Image (cartoon, rainbow, N blue to C red):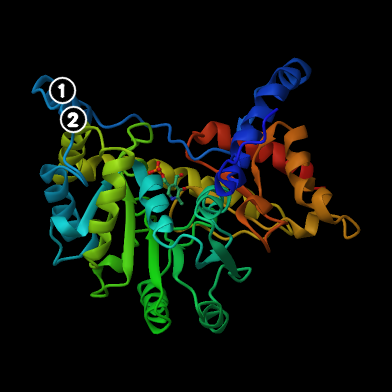
Amino acid sequence: MNNYNFSENLLNVRMSPIVSISEEVRKRAPEFKSATGKDFVLFQRGEIDFQTPQYIVDAAKKALDSGYTKYPKSGGEDIFKDAIINKLNYFNNATGFDKDNIVCTYGGQESLELSFKLFEGKKGVGFAPCWSCVLENFVPYCGTDFHQVPLGSDFSIDFDRLDKALESAAFFYLNTPQNPTGKLFTKEEVTAIAELCLKHGAFLISDEAYEAVVFDGEKHFSPTSLDYENIISTFTLSKTYAMTGWRLGYLVTRNKQIPKLLKLGNYTQTAGVTTFLQYAAAEALNNKEESQKAVNKMVTEFTKRRNLFYEGLTQIEGLGVTKPKGGFYFFPNFSEFIPADISGEERKLYIYNLLLKEGVASVYGSCFGNYFDDYIRFSFSTTPVPIIEEGLERMKKIFIK
Ligand SMILES: Cc1ncc(COP(=O)(O)O)c(C=O)c1O
């Protein structure tokens, strides 16, 4: 076979471990079913079991019927950008933006990829644990020299360590509310991080995919509301409106050089986001009343699931559980349940395998970077209350003696 000279960065991109986990579950499910008569409980995925609200579906149909089927405007249609400016104002308390501050993208994922690409080959910093896609995809694809700053076991920030890590960094990646911990960074924390970035001449890439999935009446604080030029905030409609398959997102920055730069790349790579979908996206954001109704319905259901999950997990003595304030994940610490003489790869998979044997699919902590090998991520985004109850019963059988 010829030894072609492919891009090394591209060859370094890895398949998400969550995909391999789902494949493993698919293989093992029939055997589990015939032995127990039961289905696997699937806590591994970040999909959502809601349908896209009808008012958005209708807007997409109307846009198609109206003939919005031509090439889109590079960087985003005016109607979508105006809706984004409106939403930044009413939802994020962020003002002073115009269309030149915005790039419309294929989901939050493309916003992030473009942002990481701006700093290709440079030093980037982020908290551990960290969303696996950053580590498996953006970092290798963009040749980022990525440094991880661990959060504490209660997911608190060590600002001295962060300060040191940011020396000579080109950017810091922040995700709030955070996948996988469910941590909602406070206004004070976000502001302090932005200011540390400013001090070191670094950009803050802020991933706000879960901005609408916030519990207990708390509110997401977007750094975009700060009057700094060194911030890029990335947003998506995927989670807010159960639109994961529509692939709609956008990035926002006060630094006007960036959209200009990205527009060039965006134009040559994808020629922009599907035109009629941008009209539906505009309606999704502009129709505040319907939007609020849809978000409230989703958050009410997720709150029920979170509370039940939390109650169940805290009944397992020795488990380190933090109640998530946003997103739809738990990230408990299973150290107490792993024999001390187990290490390395075996340790990373120990709890995950125990759970699989009992028909519970999860994601092991090492998928989210260094430092959290003894942790497990459970998603409750596709599991109604009875399924969570079943999953908890199976876990109690393993961990309560
Ligand atoms: C932390 C985080 N950021 C961004 C995204 C991007 O989502 P999308 O590309 O669907 O907008 C996800 C999706 O799971 C996520 O978990």
Residue marked by disc 2: 276
State the separation of the CA atoms marked 1 and 2.
Answer: 6 Å
Mark 1 vs 2, N-terminal side:
1
**Horizontal and vertical percent for residue 111?**
35, 50
Horizontal placement of 347 versus 366: left or right?
right
**Horizontal and vertical percent for residue 128?**
58, 63
Is any part of residue 55 visible from this angle? no
What amino acid type should be assigned to the residue bearing mark 2?
A: Phe
Label 1: element kind: helix
Residue marked by disc 1: 64
Is residue 188 placed above or below 63 in the rendered structure? below
Neighbours of disc 2 within 10 Å: few (<14), some (14-19), many (20+):
many
What amino acid type should be assigned to the residue bearing mark 1?
A: Leu
Q: Residue at x 42, y 55 (%)?
A: 117
**Based on the displayed image, in which of its 4 quarters is residue 44 positioned?**
top right
Are the two marked residues, 1 and 2, in contact with CB atoms closer than 8 angstroms? yes
Q: Residue at x 76, y 51 (%)?
A: 348
Q: Residue furthest right?
A: 341
